[in-house]
Image (tube, rainbow, N blue to C red):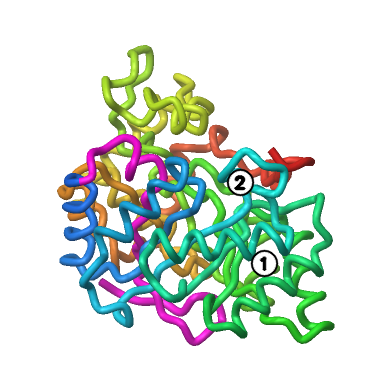
Amino acid sequence: MEFRHLGRSGLKVSEISYGNWITHGSQVEEEAARQCVQAALDEGITTFDTADVYAGTKAEEVLGRALKGVRRESLEIFTKVYWPTGPGQNDRGLSRKHVTEAIHGSLRRLQTDYVDLYQAHRFDFETPLEETLKTFDDLVRQGKVLYVGVSEWSADQISQALKIADEMGFDRIVSNQPQYSMLWRVIESEIVPLSEREGVGQIVWSPIAQGVLTGKYLPGQPAPAGSRATDPTGGNFISRMLADDVLSRVQELKPIAADLGLSMAQLAVAWVLQNPNVSSAIVGASRPEQVRDNVKAAGVKLDDDVLKRIDDVLGPVVERDPGKTVSPPRRP
């Protein structure tokens, strides 16, 4: 495993991190989840990403139990806040009330005194940004949070937050967690240049495009039983990538991976890690062998010719519109 700084901060993270969206507390049984976490630890992954909303808070509980007994200082544990975790009007969003209550719930479920990174899971249009940033800053000063970040914020929203933090003396955002893959490059035109200037690192999710870039989904054929595309939650995200023209072009990546001696998944993860603004790529797994396969992308260098071959193959099916990074206009 290799390590990178999280943005311009002093914190180092494993360049491949383990995330438990959908899987823990949902798609896989707890023993399988525990085995995946153990495989991640065995392979040198130290960075674990979750969120309070995953599996209705169960994912944090599963991760907390799976990491119990591991030396806390050897880990970087990330979680997030924004989406609903209860029925009340204040069980969601980024108000001082919800953020404060949410971190206490996350710490309890994760069985830890602090999280290394606390992330605003979306932008909250119903809460003044100053209120959210002041609350995050208070949690840092209380020692419950070491660093703060955001997820799926636009370049303008990140810029606003950095300006307020500088003016008010708050802790600055050090990271953004966007979707990013060979097929989904919406961060490249605006968010990455801003982040490079401001010292914000990307912790990217879905580098394998929810499994599409493994090549297992074939044009004109139904999704394999038990795959991410058949999950009621994950299927919403993957459906836009299951068009036959996308799947046909993905099949054309197989010779490129074979020439490099990589699996398709390894090629996909290695590709996002070529971007120097990426601090870590999040991989998920339902089986330990998936973790072991994905981590082999760490340290892989792809030369310019390979990157051009990939671009030539995928061509028009790549999504690049920065306007695709959006948060709900009102809390869900």
Which residue is located at x 34 percent, y 63 percent? Answer: 16
Which residue is located at x 41 percent, y 30 percent? Answer: 249
Q: Which of marks 1 and 2 is in front?
A: 2
Hey, what amino acid is under mark 1?
Answer: Pro
Residue 104 visible from this viewpoint: yes
Residue 308, relative to residue 221: is it above or below? below
Residue 240, relative to residue 261: is it above or below? above
Can you tell which mark lies on residue 193?
1
Left or right of 303 on screen, residue 89: right
Report the predominant secondary structure element of the magenta stretch. loop
SS at mark 1 in the image:
helix
Residue 133, relative to residue 50: is it above or below? below
Closer to the camera, 21 or 301?
A: 21
Q: Which quadrant of the figure has residue 7?
A: bottom right
> Which residue in the structure is indicated by mark 2?
83
SS at mark 2 in the image:
loop
Closer to the camera, 114 or 255?
A: 114
Residue 187, relative to residue 173: is it above or below? above
Across and down, in percent, residue 77 comes to 40, 68
Taking the magenta stretch, the answer to whether it contains residue 219 is no
Can you tell which mark lies on residue 117?
none
Hey, what amino acid is under mark 2?
Answer: Trp
Q: What stretch is highlighted in magenta?
A: 1-30
Across and down, in percent, residue 234 comes to 44, 33
Across and down, in percent, residue 312 comes to 47, 41
Left or right of 298 on screen, residue 106: right
Across and down, in percent, residue 10 comes to 49, 87
